[in-house]
């Protein structure tokens, strides 16, 4: 996931970035964060981002006006407005704003906003599954596990499975989702579907079993406990 911070106060950007970075480290989520000091600078590359923290008042214009502009080319961009003034709230709501936070932003409100963003991002995330003759775009949330099987990779979903020509390593590099963990060189597991753990074997909600190597077992347990805490 990719997040932008657009604010003309350098000190605020740096401290805000540190808080966001700490959140993603604690939740074991890979995230790219970039800073922008002006609306025009961000508007030039906005297609690259999933979420932007946008200051309502910038030295080069109104943040709300910039969001109207970038939404024309990136309609799925989620926006959290930042401001010291509450008067922009009504206008921001018309833009279907994800959140509206008044500075200084309390840590608990920032954490709540990021929690909601991560859940929405993970739910809407698509996995590209080429099968030779056809390419499928599958919701990551629906994938139970991915298994390397000789010259194919099996993508097992809640409704069926696909035999893909993409390698399991390529799948893992592209997933970038905290729900998934590579338990074995031949398996990538969606922790959402874990039913029980029997030594080095993980039983899924549909009764299927996934292997976990000794090398990755302790790390898997740590990540799974973190996942359960995050989801509860």
Image (cartoon, rainbow, N blue to C red):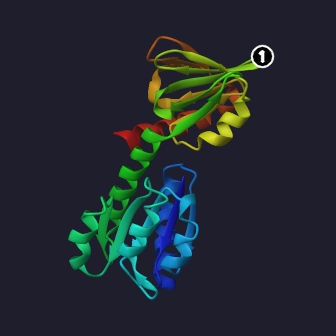
Front residue of 162/68: it is: 68
Q: Residue furthest top?
A: 207
Residue 178 point in image, percent of width and height: 52, 42
Q: Residue at horizontal 74%, vertical 29%?
A: 167
Residue 113, placed above or below residue 227: below
Farthest right residue in view: 151
Residue 86 versus residue 60 in the image, above or below = above
Residue 134 drawn at (x, y percent): 64, 24
User: What kind of element bears circle 1?
Assistant: loop
Residues packed near mark 1 inside 10 Å, few (<14), some (14 to 19) or many (20 plus): few
Q: Residue at x 78, y 18 (%)?
A: 151
Q: Quarter holding the C terminus? A: top left
Judge from the rendering whether residue 128 lies leftward or rightward of residue 231; answer left or right. Answer: right
Above or below 22: residue 5:
below
Q: Give the residue drawn at x 31%, y 63%.
A: 95
Q: Residue under label 1, please give it.
A: 150
Residue drawn at x 39%, y 62% as measured from the top left: 79
């Amino acid at each position: 996931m990719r997040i932008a911070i657009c604010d003309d106060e350098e000190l605020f950007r740096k401290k805000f970035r540190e808080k966001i970075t700490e959140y993603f480290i604690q939740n074991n989520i890979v995230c790219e964060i970039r800073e922008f000091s002006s609306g025009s600078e961000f508007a030039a590359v906005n297609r690259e981002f999933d979420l932007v923290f946008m200051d309502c008042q910038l030295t080069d214009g109104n943040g709300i006006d910039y969001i109207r502009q970038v939404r024309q080319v990136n309609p799925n961009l989620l926006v959290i407005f930042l401001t010291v003034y509450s008067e922009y709230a009504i206008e921001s709501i018309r833009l279907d704003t994800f959140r509206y936070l008044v500075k200084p932003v309390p840590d608990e409100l920032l954490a709540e906003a990021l929690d909601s963003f991560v859940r929405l991002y993970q739910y809407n995330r698509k996995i590209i599954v080429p099968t030779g003759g056809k390419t499928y775009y599958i919701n990551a949330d629906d994938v139970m596990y991915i298994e390397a099987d000789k010259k194919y990779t099996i993508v097992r979903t809640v409704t069926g499975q696909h035999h893909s020509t993409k390698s399991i390593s390529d799948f893992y590099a592209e997933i970038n989702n905290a729900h998934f963990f590579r338990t074995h060189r031949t398996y990538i597991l969606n922790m959402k579907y874990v039913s029980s753990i029997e030594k080095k074997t993980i039983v899924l909600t549909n009764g299927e079993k996934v292997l976990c190597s000794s090398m990755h077992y302790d790390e898997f347990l740590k990540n799974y406990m973190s996942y359960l805490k995050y989801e509860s």
